[in-house]
Amino acid sequence: MADAAVRIATERLSAMYGKSTAVKDVTLSFAANRVHALIGPSGCGKSTFLRAMNRMHELTPGGWITGRVLLDGQDVYAPGVNPMQLRRRVGMVFQKPTPFPTMSIFDNVAAGLRVGQRRPKAELAETVEQALRGAALWDEVKDRLATSAVALSGGQQQRLCVARTIAPQPEVILLDEPTASLDPQGTQRIEELLFTLKQTFTIIIVTHNMQQAARVSDTTTFFYLGGMVETGATRQLFTSPAREETEAYITGRFG
Amino acid sequence: MNRAAARRRRSHFMVGLMGLAVVLAVLPLLLILGTLVAKGASSLNLAFFTKMPVPAGETGGGVMHAIVGTLMIVGTACLIGLPLGIGGGIYCAEYPGSKLATVTRFVSDVLNGTPSIVVGVFAWTWIVATQKHFSAFAGSVALAILMVPMVTRTTEEMIKLVPHSLREAALALGYSRWRTSLTVVVRTTLPGIVTGSLLAVARVAGETAPLLFTALGSQYLSFDLDQPMAALPLVVFTYATGPYEEWHQLAWATALVLILVVLVLSVAARLATRGKFRQNG
Protein backbone atom coordinates (compact mmCIF):
# COMPACT_ATOMS: atom_id res chain seq x y z
CA MET A 1 0.00 0.00 0.00
CA ALA A 2 2.84 2.34 0.77
CA ASP A 3 4.07 2.09 -2.80
CA ALA A 4 1.00 3.80 -4.28
CA ALA A 5 1.60 7.37 -5.48
CA VAL A 6 0.43 10.17 -3.20
CA ARG A 7 -2.49 12.03 -4.78
CA ILE A 8 -3.28 14.62 -2.17
CA ALA A 9 -1.50 15.58 1.03
CA THR A 10 -1.59 18.16 3.79
CA GLU A 11 1.39 19.79 5.46
CA ARG A 12 0.89 21.23 8.93
CA LEU A 13 -2.66 22.19 7.99
CA SER A 14 -4.62 24.17 10.56
CA ALA A 15 -8.15 25.43 9.93
CA MET A 16 -9.74 28.22 11.94
CA TYR A 17 -13.13 29.86 12.35
CA GLY A 18 -12.25 33.39 13.34
CA LYS A 19 -10.16 32.97 16.47
CA SER A 20 -11.12 29.39 17.30
CA THR A 21 -9.09 26.56 15.82
CA ALA A 22 -10.97 23.54 14.49
CA VAL A 23 -8.06 21.62 12.97
CA LYS A 24 -4.56 21.75 14.46
CA ASP A 25 -1.38 21.12 12.54
CA VAL A 26 -2.33 18.03 10.56
CA THR A 27 0.16 16.44 8.19
CA LEU A 28 -1.27 13.55 6.20
CA SER A 29 -0.94 12.04 2.77
CA PHE A 30 -3.52 10.10 0.80
CA ALA A 31 -2.48 7.54 -1.79
CA ALA A 32 -4.19 7.37 -5.17
CA ASN A 33 -6.93 4.78 -5.78
CA ARG A 34 -7.54 4.07 -2.13
CA VAL A 35 -10.43 4.72 0.22
CA HIS A 36 -9.32 6.74 3.22
CA ALA A 37 -11.59 7.06 6.24
CA LEU A 38 -11.52 9.91 8.74
CA ILE A 39 -13.11 8.99 12.06
CA GLY A 40 -13.55 10.69 15.39
CA PRO A 41 -16.21 12.05 17.75
CA SER A 42 -18.42 15.01 16.82
CA GLY A 43 -16.57 18.30 16.70
CA CYS A 44 -13.15 16.69 16.31
CA GLY A 45 -12.47 18.70 13.15
CA LYS A 46 -12.67 15.90 10.59
CA SER A 47 -15.33 17.63 8.48
CA THR A 48 -13.48 20.95 8.62
CA PHE A 49 -10.30 19.16 7.58
CA LEU A 50 -12.17 17.69 4.60
CA ARG A 51 -13.60 21.06 3.62
CA ALA A 52 -10.17 22.68 3.78
CA MET A 53 -8.93 20.32 1.07
CA ASN A 54 -11.18 21.67 -1.69
CA ARG A 55 -11.20 25.18 -0.25
CA MET A 56 -14.84 25.04 0.82
CA HIS A 57 -13.78 25.96 4.34
CA GLU A 58 -12.88 29.51 3.34
CA LEU A 59 -16.46 30.09 2.12
CA THR A 60 -17.69 29.86 5.70
CA PRO A 61 -17.67 33.35 7.24
CA GLY A 62 -14.50 33.67 9.30
CA GLY A 63 -12.91 30.54 7.82
CA TRP A 64 -9.15 30.62 7.19
CA ILE A 65 -6.21 28.23 7.21
CA THR A 66 -2.47 27.96 7.69
CA GLY A 67 -0.24 25.28 6.21
CA ARG A 68 -0.44 23.67 2.79
CA VAL A 69 -2.61 21.27 0.83
CA LEU A 70 -0.78 19.58 -2.03
CA LEU A 71 -2.70 18.12 -4.94
CA ASP A 72 -0.26 16.21 -7.18
CA GLY A 73 2.50 18.17 -5.45
CA GLN A 74 0.99 21.59 -6.18
CA ASP A 75 -0.15 23.79 -3.28
CA VAL A 76 -3.86 24.45 -3.81
CA TYR A 77 -3.64 27.55 -1.62
CA ALA A 78 -0.85 29.09 -3.67
CA PRO A 79 -1.65 32.51 -5.11
CA GLY A 80 -2.91 32.15 -8.66
CA VAL A 81 -4.81 28.93 -7.99
CA ASN A 82 -8.45 29.35 -8.96
CA PRO A 83 -10.57 27.69 -6.26
CA MET A 84 -13.38 27.01 -8.76
CA GLN A 85 -11.03 25.03 -11.00
CA LEU A 86 -9.66 23.24 -7.95
CA ARG A 87 -13.17 22.15 -6.93
CA ARG A 88 -13.64 20.58 -10.36
CA ARG A 89 -10.61 18.40 -9.60
CA VAL A 90 -11.58 17.68 -5.99
CA GLY A 91 -15.29 16.85 -5.90
CA MET A 92 -17.47 16.65 -2.82
CA VAL A 93 -20.57 14.74 -1.66
CA PHE A 94 -22.45 16.01 1.37
CA GLN A 95 -24.24 14.50 4.33
CA LYS A 96 -27.72 15.29 3.03
CA PRO A 97 -28.54 14.58 -0.61
CA THR A 98 -28.62 17.92 -2.43
CA PRO A 99 -30.15 17.44 -5.89
CA PHE A 100 -31.01 20.77 -7.54
CA PRO A 101 -34.81 20.82 -7.22
CA THR A 102 -35.50 22.78 -10.40
CA MET A 103 -33.40 20.51 -12.61
CA SER A 104 -34.19 17.16 -14.18
CA ILE A 105 -32.16 14.06 -13.34
CA PHE A 106 -30.15 14.56 -16.53
CA ASP A 107 -29.49 18.24 -15.85
CA ASN A 108 -28.42 17.48 -12.30
CA VAL A 109 -25.70 15.14 -13.50
CA ALA A 110 -24.76 17.53 -16.31
CA ALA A 111 -24.61 20.52 -13.95
CA GLY A 112 -20.90 20.18 -13.24
CA LEU A 113 -20.12 19.57 -16.91
CA ARG A 114 -21.71 22.81 -18.02
CA VAL A 115 -19.27 25.03 -16.08
CA GLY A 116 -16.23 23.98 -18.06
CA GLN A 117 -15.77 24.16 -21.81
CA ARG A 118 -18.81 23.62 -24.05
CA ARG A 119 -19.36 20.01 -25.09
CA PRO A 120 -21.31 18.61 -28.02
CA LYS A 121 -24.73 17.26 -27.05
CA ALA A 122 -23.91 13.64 -27.83
CA GLU A 123 -20.76 13.76 -25.74
CA LEU A 124 -22.70 15.32 -22.87
CA ALA A 125 -25.32 12.56 -22.98
CA GLU A 126 -22.56 9.95 -23.11
CA THR A 127 -20.77 11.41 -20.08
CA VAL A 128 -24.02 11.66 -18.10
CA GLU A 129 -24.77 8.01 -18.83
CA GLN A 130 -21.27 6.97 -17.78
CA ALA A 131 -21.59 8.94 -14.54
CA LEU A 132 -24.99 7.43 -13.74
CA ARG A 133 -23.62 3.94 -14.46
CA GLY A 134 -20.64 4.72 -12.28
CA ALA A 135 -22.99 5.65 -9.45
CA ALA A 136 -25.05 2.46 -10.00
CA LEU A 137 -28.15 4.49 -10.75
CA TRP A 138 -28.48 4.18 -14.51
CA ASP A 139 -30.84 1.20 -14.59
CA GLU A 140 -33.22 2.87 -12.15
CA VAL A 141 -33.49 6.23 -13.92
CA LYS A 142 -32.67 5.64 -17.60
CA ASP A 143 -36.34 5.86 -18.58
CA ARG A 144 -37.04 9.07 -16.71
CA LEU A 145 -33.97 11.25 -17.17
CA ALA A 146 -36.13 14.27 -17.95
CA THR A 147 -38.19 14.05 -14.75
CA SER A 148 -37.55 15.95 -11.53
CA ALA A 149 -34.68 14.79 -9.36
CA VAL A 150 -36.54 15.37 -6.11
CA ALA A 151 -38.99 12.56 -6.91
CA LEU A 152 -36.18 10.03 -6.28
CA SER A 153 -35.80 8.28 -2.93
CA GLY A 154 -33.19 9.54 -0.46
CA GLY A 155 -30.74 6.80 -1.38
CA GLN A 156 -31.23 7.41 -5.09
CA GLN A 157 -30.79 11.14 -4.55
CA GLN A 158 -27.48 10.53 -2.82
CA ARG A 159 -26.28 8.29 -5.66
CA LEU A 160 -27.42 11.03 -8.04
CA CYS A 161 -25.17 13.41 -6.11
CA VAL A 162 -22.31 10.92 -6.48
CA ALA A 163 -23.01 10.79 -10.23
CA ARG A 164 -23.03 14.59 -10.36
CA THR A 165 -19.69 14.68 -8.54
CA ILE A 166 -17.93 12.07 -10.71
CA ALA A 167 -19.29 13.34 -14.05
CA PRO A 168 -16.59 16.01 -14.51
CA GLN A 169 -13.93 13.32 -13.78
CA PRO A 170 -12.32 14.78 -10.66
CA GLU A 171 -9.15 13.21 -9.24
CA VAL A 172 -10.25 13.16 -5.62
CA ILE A 173 -13.73 12.66 -4.14
CA LEU A 174 -14.43 13.94 -0.64
CA LEU A 175 -17.45 12.40 1.07
CA ASP A 176 -18.75 14.07 4.22
CA GLU A 177 -20.78 11.42 6.07
CA PRO A 178 -22.54 10.45 2.84
CA THR A 179 -24.73 7.80 4.43
CA ALA A 180 -25.74 9.64 7.61
CA SER A 181 -29.24 10.36 6.31
CA LEU A 182 -29.79 7.05 4.50
CA ASP A 183 -31.48 3.80 5.51
CA PRO A 184 -29.37 0.59 5.77
CA GLN A 185 -30.11 -0.40 2.18
CA GLY A 186 -29.11 3.00 0.80
CA THR A 187 -26.02 2.90 2.98
CA GLN A 188 -25.02 -0.50 1.64
CA ARG A 189 -25.34 0.63 -1.98
CA ILE A 190 -23.12 3.66 -1.35
CA GLU A 191 -20.55 1.48 0.40
CA GLU A 192 -20.50 -1.01 -2.48
CA LEU A 193 -20.07 1.91 -4.82
CA LEU A 194 -16.87 2.99 -3.09
CA PHE A 195 -15.15 -0.26 -4.10
CA THR A 196 -15.72 0.41 -7.78
CA LEU A 197 -15.10 4.15 -7.55
CA LYS A 198 -11.62 3.69 -6.08
CA GLN A 199 -10.49 2.08 -9.34
CA THR A 200 -10.73 5.55 -10.86
CA PHE A 201 -10.67 8.04 -8.02
CA THR A 202 -8.95 8.77 -4.74
CA ILE A 203 -11.59 8.73 -2.04
CA ILE A 204 -11.61 10.38 1.37
CA ILE A 205 -14.67 9.68 3.49
CA VAL A 206 -15.63 11.22 6.82
CA THR A 207 -17.79 8.90 8.86
CA HIS A 208 -19.27 8.61 12.31
CA ASN A 209 -19.75 4.94 11.84
CA MET A 210 -16.70 2.89 12.77
CA GLN A 211 -18.05 -0.31 11.25
CA GLN A 212 -18.40 1.60 8.02
CA ALA A 213 -14.81 2.80 8.20
CA ALA A 214 -13.67 -0.76 8.88
CA ARG A 215 -15.73 -2.14 5.97
CA VAL A 216 -14.87 0.30 3.20
CA SER A 217 -11.52 1.91 3.83
CA ASP A 218 -7.91 0.98 3.16
CA THR A 219 -6.47 3.49 5.59
CA THR A 220 -8.06 5.16 8.59
CA THR A 221 -7.17 8.33 10.45
CA PHE A 222 -8.45 9.07 13.94
CA PHE A 223 -9.13 12.72 14.79
CA TYR A 224 -9.63 13.97 18.30
CA LEU A 225 -10.00 17.56 19.58
CA GLY A 226 -8.92 19.01 16.25
CA GLY A 227 -5.72 17.05 16.06
CA MET A 228 -4.71 13.93 14.18
CA VAL A 229 -4.11 11.18 16.75
CA GLU A 230 -3.25 8.18 14.66
CA THR A 231 -3.23 7.09 11.05
CA GLY A 232 -2.50 3.79 9.39
CA ALA A 233 -3.80 0.79 7.52
CA THR A 234 -7.41 0.24 8.53
CA ARG A 235 -6.99 -3.33 9.72
CA GLN A 236 -4.02 -2.43 11.85
CA LEU A 237 -5.65 0.63 13.36
CA PHE A 238 -8.74 -1.30 14.33
CA THR A 239 -6.97 -4.41 15.64
CA SER A 240 -3.89 -3.02 17.31
CA PRO A 241 -4.06 0.74 17.67
CA ALA A 242 -0.84 2.38 18.80
CA ARG A 243 -2.45 5.07 20.90
CA GLU A 244 -4.61 4.72 23.95
CA GLU A 245 -7.20 7.35 22.83
CA THR A 246 -7.70 5.47 19.58
CA GLU A 247 -8.32 2.24 21.38
CA ALA A 248 -10.73 3.96 23.78
CA TYR A 249 -12.67 5.40 20.86
CA ILE A 250 -12.88 2.30 18.69
CA THR A 251 -13.88 0.13 21.60
CA GLY A 252 -16.68 2.56 22.36
CA ARG A 253 -15.47 3.95 25.65
CA PHE A 254 -16.23 7.52 24.50
CA GLY A 255 -17.44 9.50 21.48
CA MET B 1 -61.30 12.45 34.71
CA ASN B 2 -62.86 15.68 35.84
CA ARG B 3 -59.76 17.61 34.93
CA ALA B 4 -59.74 16.13 31.43
CA ALA B 5 -63.30 17.29 30.89
CA ALA B 6 -62.46 20.79 32.10
CA ARG B 7 -59.49 20.89 29.77
CA ARG B 8 -61.59 19.78 26.87
CA ARG B 9 -64.16 22.48 27.63
CA ARG B 10 -61.48 25.12 27.74
CA SER B 11 -59.98 23.87 24.51
CA HIS B 12 -63.40 24.05 22.79
CA PHE B 13 -63.90 27.56 24.14
CA MET B 14 -60.52 28.72 22.81
CA VAL B 15 -61.04 27.12 19.40
CA GLY B 16 -64.42 28.85 19.30
CA LEU B 17 -62.76 32.21 20.06
CA MET B 18 -60.25 31.70 17.28
CA GLY B 19 -62.99 30.71 14.87
CA LEU B 20 -64.77 33.94 15.76
CA ALA B 21 -61.58 35.91 15.07
CA VAL B 22 -61.32 34.27 11.63
CA VAL B 23 -64.92 35.16 10.82
CA LEU B 24 -64.36 38.77 11.94
CA ALA B 25 -61.19 38.99 9.83
CA VAL B 26 -62.83 37.66 6.68
CA LEU B 27 -66.13 39.47 7.15
CA PRO B 28 -65.03 42.86 5.76
CA LEU B 29 -63.69 41.23 2.59
CA LEU B 30 -66.96 39.37 2.03
CA LEU B 31 -69.00 42.50 2.76
CA ILE B 32 -66.96 44.57 0.30
CA LEU B 33 -67.19 41.94 -2.41
CA GLY B 34 -70.91 41.46 -1.73
CA THR B 35 -71.68 45.17 -1.89
CA LEU B 36 -69.64 45.59 -5.08
CA VAL B 37 -71.35 42.69 -6.78
CA ALA B 38 -74.81 43.81 -5.61
CA LYS B 39 -74.37 47.42 -6.74
CA GLY B 40 -71.96 47.06 -9.64
CA ALA B 41 -72.71 43.80 -11.40
CA SER B 42 -75.92 45.13 -12.98
CA SER B 43 -73.91 47.76 -14.90
CA LEU B 44 -71.34 45.27 -16.17
CA ASN B 45 -71.66 44.19 -19.79
CA LEU B 46 -69.39 43.82 -22.77
CA ALA B 47 -69.77 47.50 -23.66
CA PHE B 48 -68.40 48.40 -20.27
CA PHE B 49 -65.07 46.87 -21.23
CA THR B 50 -64.97 47.97 -24.87
CA LYS B 51 -66.61 51.42 -25.00
CA MET B 52 -65.50 54.89 -24.03
CA PRO B 53 -67.39 56.94 -21.46
CA VAL B 54 -70.44 58.95 -22.59
CA PRO B 55 -71.34 62.49 -21.43
CA ALA B 56 -73.20 62.81 -18.15
CA GLY B 57 -76.93 62.21 -18.50
CA GLU B 58 -76.61 59.59 -21.25
CA THR B 59 -76.68 55.91 -20.42
CA GLY B 60 -74.31 53.21 -21.65
CA GLY B 61 -70.63 53.70 -22.37
CA GLY B 62 -67.71 52.04 -20.67
CA VAL B 63 -64.31 52.49 -19.10
CA MET B 64 -62.07 50.98 -21.76
CA HIS B 65 -59.81 54.03 -21.56
CA ALA B 66 -59.21 53.40 -17.86
CA ILE B 67 -58.58 49.68 -18.33
CA VAL B 68 -55.99 50.44 -21.01
CA GLY B 69 -54.58 53.24 -18.84
CA THR B 70 -54.21 51.05 -15.78
CA LEU B 71 -52.51 48.32 -17.82
CA MET B 72 -50.06 50.83 -19.33
CA ILE B 73 -49.28 52.69 -16.12
CA VAL B 74 -48.91 49.54 -14.01
CA GLY B 75 -47.01 47.78 -16.82
CA THR B 76 -44.49 50.60 -17.02
CA ALA B 77 -44.24 50.65 -13.24
CA CYS B 78 -43.35 46.94 -13.38
CA LEU B 79 -40.64 47.55 -15.98
CA ILE B 80 -39.05 50.10 -13.65
CA GLY B 81 -39.82 48.60 -10.26
CA LEU B 82 -39.44 44.83 -10.64
CA PRO B 83 -35.80 44.73 -11.86
CA LEU B 84 -34.79 47.18 -9.12
CA GLY B 85 -36.75 45.35 -6.44
CA ILE B 86 -35.66 41.85 -7.40
CA GLY B 87 -32.06 42.94 -7.89
CA GLY B 88 -32.05 44.65 -4.50
CA GLY B 89 -33.54 41.57 -2.87
CA ILE B 90 -30.91 39.28 -4.39
CA TYR B 91 -28.17 41.62 -3.21
CA CYS B 92 -29.53 41.75 0.36
CA ALA B 93 -29.77 37.95 0.49
CA GLU B 94 -26.32 37.34 -1.03
CA TYR B 95 -24.45 39.92 1.05
CA PRO B 96 -26.54 39.91 4.23
CA GLY B 97 -23.89 41.45 6.47
CA SER B 98 -22.84 44.29 4.18
CA LYS B 99 -23.54 47.88 5.10
CA LEU B 100 -25.43 48.52 1.87
CA ALA B 101 -27.76 45.59 2.58
CA THR B 102 -28.47 46.84 6.10
CA VAL B 103 -29.24 50.30 4.76
CA THR B 104 -31.40 48.86 1.95
CA ARG B 105 -33.37 46.77 4.42
CA PHE B 106 -33.96 49.75 6.71
CA VAL B 107 -34.95 52.08 3.88
CA SER B 108 -37.27 49.42 2.44
CA ASP B 109 -39.04 49.00 5.76
CA VAL B 110 -39.47 52.76 6.11
CA LEU B 111 -40.71 53.09 2.52
CA ASN B 112 -43.14 50.21 3.07
CA GLY B 113 -44.74 52.24 5.82
CA THR B 114 -44.78 55.52 3.91
CA PRO B 115 -48.28 56.67 2.89
CA SER B 116 -48.66 56.37 -0.86
CA ILE B 117 -49.80 59.99 -1.13
CA VAL B 118 -46.35 61.10 0.04
CA VAL B 119 -44.81 59.11 -2.80
CA GLY B 120 -47.31 60.78 -5.15
CA VAL B 121 -46.27 64.23 -4.00
CA PHE B 122 -42.64 63.24 -4.43
CA ALA B 123 -43.28 62.11 -8.02
CA TRP B 124 -45.16 65.34 -8.63
CA THR B 125 -42.24 67.47 -7.41
CA TRP B 126 -39.69 65.39 -9.21
CA ILE B 127 -41.31 64.88 -12.61
CA VAL B 128 -44.59 66.78 -13.04
CA ALA B 129 -43.32 70.08 -11.62
CA THR B 130 -40.07 69.99 -13.60
CA GLN B 131 -41.74 68.95 -16.87
CA LYS B 132 -44.61 71.35 -16.18
CA HIS B 133 -47.30 68.86 -17.25
CA PHE B 134 -49.02 65.78 -15.84
CA SER B 135 -48.04 62.46 -17.36
CA ALA B 136 -48.80 58.76 -17.06
CA PHE B 137 -45.05 58.16 -16.79
CA ALA B 138 -44.89 60.17 -13.56
CA GLY B 139 -47.66 57.90 -12.25
CA SER B 140 -45.67 54.82 -13.23
CA VAL B 141 -42.63 56.15 -11.39
CA ALA B 142 -44.72 56.76 -8.27
CA LEU B 143 -46.13 53.22 -8.40
CA ALA B 144 -42.67 51.78 -9.08
CA ILE B 145 -41.33 53.52 -5.96
CA LEU B 146 -44.13 51.86 -3.99
CA MET B 147 -43.34 48.45 -5.49
CA VAL B 148 -39.57 48.39 -4.97
CA PRO B 149 -39.50 47.98 -1.16
CA MET B 150 -42.22 45.31 -1.20
CA VAL B 151 -40.48 43.30 -3.91
CA THR B 152 -37.04 43.74 -2.32
CA ARG B 153 -38.16 42.40 1.03
CA THR B 154 -40.14 39.44 -0.31
CA THR B 155 -37.34 38.48 -2.73
CA GLU B 156 -34.83 38.52 0.11
CA GLU B 157 -37.06 36.46 2.39
CA MET B 158 -37.73 33.93 -0.39
CA ILE B 159 -34.03 33.52 -1.20
CA LYS B 160 -33.21 33.05 2.49
CA LEU B 161 -35.53 30.02 2.48
CA VAL B 162 -33.26 28.17 0.03
CA PRO B 163 -31.25 25.64 2.08
CA HIS B 164 -27.59 26.50 2.48
CA SER B 165 -26.67 22.94 1.47
CA LEU B 166 -27.95 23.60 -2.06
CA ARG B 167 -25.66 26.60 -2.43
CA GLU B 168 -22.71 24.57 -1.14
CA ALA B 169 -23.45 21.74 -3.55
CA ALA B 170 -23.23 24.14 -6.48
CA LEU B 171 -20.05 25.79 -5.18
CA ALA B 172 -18.46 22.35 -4.67
CA LEU B 173 -19.08 21.60 -8.35
CA GLY B 174 -16.87 24.55 -9.23
CA TYR B 175 -19.67 27.07 -9.78
CA SER B 176 -18.76 30.71 -9.35
CA ARG B 177 -20.69 32.70 -6.83
CA TRP B 178 -22.89 34.59 -9.30
CA ARG B 179 -23.59 31.43 -11.26
CA THR B 180 -24.62 29.67 -8.06
CA SER B 181 -26.92 32.57 -7.23
CA LEU B 182 -28.63 32.73 -10.60
CA THR B 183 -28.81 29.13 -11.81
CA VAL B 184 -29.40 27.41 -8.49
CA VAL B 185 -30.58 29.76 -5.76
CA VAL B 186 -32.74 32.21 -7.73
CA ARG B 187 -33.96 29.45 -10.07
CA THR B 188 -35.14 27.45 -7.08
CA THR B 189 -36.96 30.35 -5.54
CA LEU B 190 -38.37 31.80 -8.78
CA PRO B 191 -42.03 30.91 -8.06
CA GLY B 192 -41.74 32.73 -4.75
CA ILE B 193 -40.27 35.81 -6.42
CA VAL B 194 -43.06 35.73 -9.01
CA THR B 195 -45.64 35.58 -6.23
CA GLY B 196 -44.09 38.49 -4.38
CA SER B 197 -43.99 40.52 -7.58
CA LEU B 198 -47.61 39.77 -8.50
CA LEU B 199 -48.77 40.68 -5.00
CA ALA B 200 -46.90 43.97 -5.27
CA VAL B 201 -48.53 44.61 -8.67
CA ALA B 202 -51.94 43.84 -7.21
CA ARG B 203 -51.24 46.24 -4.37
CA VAL B 204 -50.25 49.19 -6.56
CA ALA B 205 -52.90 48.54 -9.23
CA GLY B 206 -55.50 49.88 -6.83
CA GLU B 207 -53.50 52.92 -5.68
CA THR B 208 -55.35 56.20 -6.25
CA ALA B 209 -53.56 58.91 -4.30
CA PRO B 210 -50.19 58.75 -6.11
CA LEU B 211 -51.97 58.91 -9.48
CA LEU B 212 -54.00 62.02 -8.59
CA PHE B 213 -50.92 64.23 -8.80
CA THR B 214 -49.26 62.43 -11.67
CA ALA B 215 -51.35 60.58 -14.26
CA LEU B 216 -54.22 62.93 -13.37
CA GLY B 217 -56.87 61.04 -15.35
CA SER B 218 -58.37 61.64 -18.75
CA GLN B 219 -61.64 61.24 -20.63
CA TYR B 220 -59.93 59.85 -23.71
CA LEU B 221 -58.21 56.69 -24.80
CA SER B 222 -54.48 57.43 -24.80
CA PHE B 223 -51.35 55.41 -25.36
CA ASP B 224 -48.95 58.30 -24.78
CA LEU B 225 -47.08 57.86 -21.49
CA ASP B 226 -46.00 61.49 -21.68
CA GLN B 227 -49.62 62.69 -21.41
CA PRO B 228 -52.26 62.43 -18.70
CA MET B 229 -53.97 59.06 -18.76
CA ALA B 230 -57.05 57.47 -17.20
CA ALA B 231 -56.78 54.67 -14.66
CA LEU B 232 -59.40 52.54 -12.95
CA PRO B 233 -58.89 53.95 -9.42
CA LEU B 234 -59.07 57.50 -10.78
CA VAL B 235 -62.32 56.72 -12.59
CA VAL B 236 -63.77 55.31 -9.39
CA PHE B 237 -62.72 58.48 -7.59
CA THR B 238 -64.18 60.81 -10.24
CA TYR B 239 -67.46 58.94 -10.65
CA ALA B 240 -68.01 58.29 -6.95
CA THR B 241 -67.54 61.96 -6.04
CA GLY B 242 -69.60 63.22 -8.99
CA PRO B 243 -73.13 64.57 -8.66
CA TYR B 244 -75.00 62.18 -10.99
CA GLU B 245 -76.71 58.92 -10.02
CA GLU B 246 -75.51 57.16 -13.22
CA TRP B 247 -71.95 58.07 -12.31
CA HIS B 248 -72.35 56.43 -8.93
CA GLN B 249 -73.52 53.29 -10.70
CA LEU B 250 -70.46 53.40 -12.96
CA ALA B 251 -68.21 53.92 -9.95
CA TRP B 252 -69.53 50.71 -8.36
CA ALA B 253 -69.03 48.78 -11.58
CA THR B 254 -65.51 50.17 -12.08
CA ALA B 255 -64.60 49.31 -8.51
CA LEU B 256 -65.82 45.78 -9.16
CA VAL B 257 -63.59 45.54 -12.24
CA LEU B 258 -60.63 46.81 -10.23
CA ILE B 259 -61.21 44.24 -7.49
CA LEU B 260 -61.54 41.51 -10.13
CA VAL B 261 -58.18 42.52 -11.66
CA VAL B 262 -56.54 42.32 -8.23
CA LEU B 263 -58.22 38.99 -7.49
CA VAL B 264 -57.06 37.52 -10.79
CA LEU B 265 -53.50 38.63 -10.04
CA SER B 266 -53.62 37.12 -6.54
CA VAL B 267 -54.96 33.83 -7.83
CA ALA B 268 -52.28 33.83 -10.54
CA ALA B 269 -49.72 34.32 -7.78
CA ARG B 270 -51.09 31.30 -5.95
CA LEU B 271 -50.99 29.15 -9.08
CA ALA B 272 -47.42 30.22 -9.86
CA THR B 273 -46.17 28.87 -6.53
CA ARG B 274 -48.31 25.78 -6.33
CA GLY B 275 -46.50 22.47 -6.64
CA LYS B 276 -43.25 23.93 -7.90
CA PHE B 277 -41.16 24.72 -4.89
CA ARG B 278 -40.87 21.50 -2.92
CA GLN B 279 -38.23 20.68 -0.37
CA ASN B 280 -36.28 17.46 -0.64
CA GLY B 281 -37.71 14.31 0.80
Image (spheres, grey):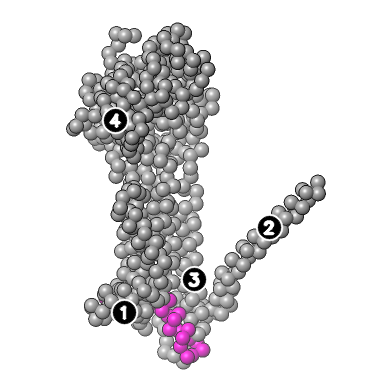
Mark sitting earlier along the chain (1/3): 1
Amino acid marked by disc 4: Ile
Q: Position of residue B194 (x, y in %)?
A: 41, 56
- Image point 45% across, 15% down: which residue? A245
Q: Position of residue B65 (x, y in %)?
A: 38, 78
Q: Chain of mark 3?
A: B
- Image point 43% across, 36% down: which residue? A98
The numbered disc on residue A65 is: 4
Q: Chain of mark 4?
A: A
Q: Is residue B244 magenta?
A: yes
Q: Which residue is mark 3?
A: B259
Circles 1 and 3: CB atoms closer than 8 Å: no
* Discs 1/4, front: 4
Q: Position of residue A178 (x, y in %)?
A: 44, 27
Amino acid marked by disc 2: Met
Badge 1 marks a residue whose secondary structure is: loop
Q: Which residue is mark 2?
A: B14
Q: Quadrant of residue A7?
A: top left
Q: From mark 1 to mark 4, how far is it between C-alphas?
A: 63 Å
Crowd class of label 1 (few under 14; some 14 to 19; many from 20; radius 10 Å) = many
Crowd class of label 3 (few under 14; some 14 to 19; many from 20; radius 10 Å) = some
Magenta segment = B222-247
